[in-house]
Amino acid sequence: MVSPAFSASLPAPLTQDDFLVFDRKQAALGQLLFYDKILSGNRNIACATCHHPKFGTGDGLSLGIGEGGVGLGPKRTAGDGASRIKKRIPRNAPALWNLGAKDLHTLFHDGRLSIAETYENGFNSPAEEWLPTGFNSLLAAQAVFPLVAQFEMSGNPKENEIAGAVHDRIDAAWPILAKRVRIIPEYGQMFIDAFAHIESAEEVTIVEIANALAAFQAIEWQSFDSPFDHYLSGNKAALSSPQKRGLDLFYGKAGCAACHSGPLLSDQKFHALGLPPFGPGRTRRFDPMVRDVGRMGESDALEDAYRFRTPMLRNVELTAPYGHNGAYPTLDGIIRHHLDPDGMLAKWQPKVASLPDVPWLAPIDFVVWHDKREMARQARFRDVDPMSLTDPEISDLVAFLGALTGTASVTTPPFGVPDKVPSGLPADTPQ
């Protein structure tokens, strides 16, 4: 719980030394792979579809429209006919800023991927002992999972060989994807040029693909040049008066830094905020209920129920909507929820969520709202105490969060969006 008397010291400034070093040739290869739909089962969705720089490296939706959808960002639709989506993505697409940081040890809203020796391969992950070895980072290990997620990128059973292999065993699909990529001549040569141990295209595996994707994301979306970063480095004129007042609230009275702590502005732990629940949720294995149990889905520990990982905050004003399910479209809204979870939950309306119209899924979108027992269970888990702030104080907090937005890292990234990709498949272009 956050104490009204809470206060925290400012973190040390982020510097280049706080980030892992990645190879630029591998990153250039990763850029193309990130925007190429060749990595999806039906060749119709890329990593960038749900993590596009146009939308702050997210998609601008509360819950994404994955495999089978059409378009990009808030204008993306659910498709039609046999290829239409079968399920909404259960959680909000997380932003990709600073995922190459050395101190980062846990990813996903429920922390189901972390650096650990649980399975003697360097990671605790959904692939358990079947995860390959040789990844260059936590970010690289993360990159392989959306590729084999049915509703994100792999597609549905009987639609393609990737989806079929996944339903045999999670690691069965990765060699098929790797072959798809390496037989494209341009990709094959780029792997030979970028990886010292690759002498022929036939040697390329999912590990090299993931390492290239990680190198690109880590270099492309590295951000520590915001006004806040300049302030931490000694330039006290970098923040405006409202931003300075917001900083004082963030690290003092409002208690934000109790969880958004350290240089990364996240404790990488899990907290229950009582956000309005909706969508299909992500449950424990064999759980028949439409709900999202948060960290408990990974740990199976009751004390982890409805708790979600603290997000990092740099560039947060670019990454709306907010919360593990994108329940709030504005920073003002998510701040007010932190201050009064139960009061905001009582006032929240489904129309606030950014959910593209999907008539065939509408009956389950808000079914959890009508489950009184489940709502009562969720109400028992709160990790923030109600707190009163004035409207001007909330405005100052919003101003401070705006001071976390990078400059060159946002406006002139090292690689940008490619005009075309080696597969020849069409790239997503914002309209």
Image (spheres, rainbow, N blue to C red):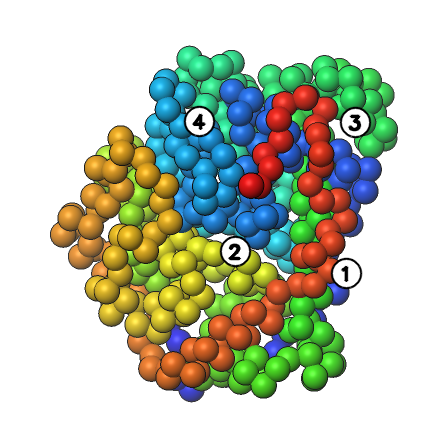
Residue 198 visible in rendering: no
**Residue type at numbered disc 2:** Thr
Residue wearing tag 4: 68
Badge 2 element: loop
Q: CA distance from mark 3 to mark 1?
A: 26 Å
Question: Furthest residue to the front?
Answer: 431
Up/down of 321 relative to 183, above or below: below
Q: CA distance from mark 2 to mark 1?
A: 23 Å
Precedes in sequence: disc 3 or disc 1: 1
Between 169 and 332, the one nearer to me in the picture = 332
Side of 91 relative to 215 (left or right): left
Crowding at label 4, few (<14), some or many (≥20) Cα neighbours within 10 Å? many
Residue beneath the point at 60% across and 37% down: 429
Looking at the picture, how far across and down is residue 105, in whole percent?
A: 59, 52
Badge 3 element: helix
Q: CA distance from mark 1 to mark 4?
A: 39 Å
Residue 191's disc number: 3
Residue wearing tag 2: 319
Precedes in sequence: disc 1 or disc 4: 1
Precedes in sequence: disc 2 or disc 1: 1
Residue wearing tag 1: 16
**Between tags 2 and 1, which lies in front?**
2
Q: CA distance from mark 4 to mark 2?
A: 23 Å
**Residue type at numbered disc 3:** Phe
Crowding at label 3, few (<14), some or many (≥20) Cα neighbours within 10 Å? many
Precedes in sequence: disc 4 or disc 2: 4
Looking at the picture, how far across and down is residue 111, in whole percent?
A: 48, 49
Q: CA distance from mark 3 to mark 2?
A: 32 Å
Circles 4, 3 touching at the beta carbon (< 8 Å): no
Precedes in sequence: disc 3 or disc 2: 3
Residue beneath the point at 75% across and 33% down: 29
